Amino acid sequence: RIVARKDGKSSTFWQQPGCGPTSIAYAPGGFVVACHYSRVLVRISAEGKTQSIITKDARGRPIGNANDSIADAKGGVYFTSSGVFIASAPATGRVYYLPPSGLPRIVAGDIHYANGVVLSPDRRYLFVSAHIGRRILRFEIGPEGRLSRRKVFVSLDRLTHGAKGAHRLAGPDGLAFDKQGNLYIAEYGAGRILVVASDRRLHRIISIKNRFVTNLEFGPRGRLYVTAPASNRVWPYKGVVLRIDDPLR
C-alpha cells in the first residue's frame, strides 16, 4: 500500500494486494505505481483510485520486477526492471520508458540489477543504479525518451572503501540531486548516503542508522527524506522515513 501523511497523521492513499510498491511517479492526472512483487505498473488518479494496470510492454513481453521510477517533463515515466538479485546472475536489468499514453518500451538493458533512477537537473541525462555492479550509469536522453551514449558516471568501489559491517550485496539504490547539482546515492546494505559532486568526487558520507537504506527525495526547504527498512529478511520489512534538514551541514 501507499501511505499519505498530513498534519502528523498517516492514512492509506492506495493499496492493492500483492503489489509490493517500490516507487511512485507523477503522471498526467495522477501517478504511476511500480508493483515489484506483482510485476505490473498501475496508473492511479490524484485521489488514489486505480485507473489501469499495465502487465506487458509494447512488444507484449512481461515487464518483470518494476522497481524505481521518475517522471520527465513530457508526461512520461522512466522505470527500472531489476533482474535477479544474485551476484552470479546475468545482467538482465532494464530501463523502460512509459509514454503519456500507450505501453512501455525498453530503452536500456544489460544492467546488473537495475535499481534507482533519476534525471539530471537539466533533464539532459538519466542516471541509473547498477546495484550489483556497484556503479552509477549515465545515459543521454534523446527524442521520445530514447537513451544513448551509456557511460559509467562513478564506480562505488573507486569512490570509497566499503562500509564496515556492510551486507555482501550492498550497492547503490535510490538517487536524488540537490539544487547544487550534487548526486545523492542511497547505498543499500551499507547504512549510508554518498554525496557526489558534479566533478564525480566524493563530497560527503551521511551515515544512516538503518543498514538497508533504499530511497531518498528532496522536499521543501532543501530537506532530504530517506526511506530505510530495519531488515531485508523479516516480513513485512518495517522501516522508517527519516528527515535530514541540512544534508551538507
Image: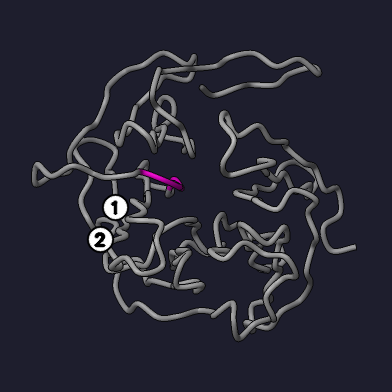
- Residue 141 located left or right of residue 234: left
Q: Nearer the viewer, residue 146 or 19?
A: 19
Q: Can you tell which quarter of the image residue 230 is in? A: top right
Q: Which residue is mark 2?
A: 107
Q: Can you tell which quarter of the image residue 243 is in? A: top right
Q: Position of residue 29 (x, y in %)?
A: 41, 25
Determine crowd level at label 2: few under 14, some 14-19, many 20+ residues with C-alpha closer than 10 A: some
Q: Position of residue 44 (x, y in %)?
A: 39, 22
Which residue is located at x 69 percent, y 76 percent? Answer: 197
Give the number of marks.
2
Q: Mark 2 is on which residue type?
A: Val
Location of the C terminus by quadrant is bottom right
Q: Judge whether 177 appears above or below 26 on screen.
A: below
Q: Nearer the viewer, residue 131 or 23?
A: 131
Q: Earlier in the sequence, mark 1 or mark 2?
A: 1
Q: Judge whether 21 appears above or below 180 on screen.
A: above
User: Looking at the rendered structure, which numbered label has been put on residue 37?
Assistant: none
Which residue is located at x 24 percent, y 31 percent? Answer: 54
Q: Can you tell which quarter of the image residue 37 is in? A: top left
Q: Position of residue 209 (x, y in %)?
A: 80, 51
Which residue is located at x 76 percent, y 76 percent? Answer: 203
Q: Which residue is mark 1?
A: 96
Q: Mark 1 is on which residue type?
A: Tyr
* SS class, disc 2: strand
Q: How far is mark 1 from mark 2, CA to CA?
A: 5 Å
Q: Judge whether 10 appears above or below 159 on screen.
A: above
Which residue is located at x 38 percent, y 33 percent? Answer: 35
- Residue 90 located left or right of residue 183: left
| Circles 1, 2 touching at the beta carbon (< 8 Å) | yes
- Residue 36 located left or right of residue 134: left
Q: Which residues are magenta?
A: 66-71
* SS class, disc 1: strand
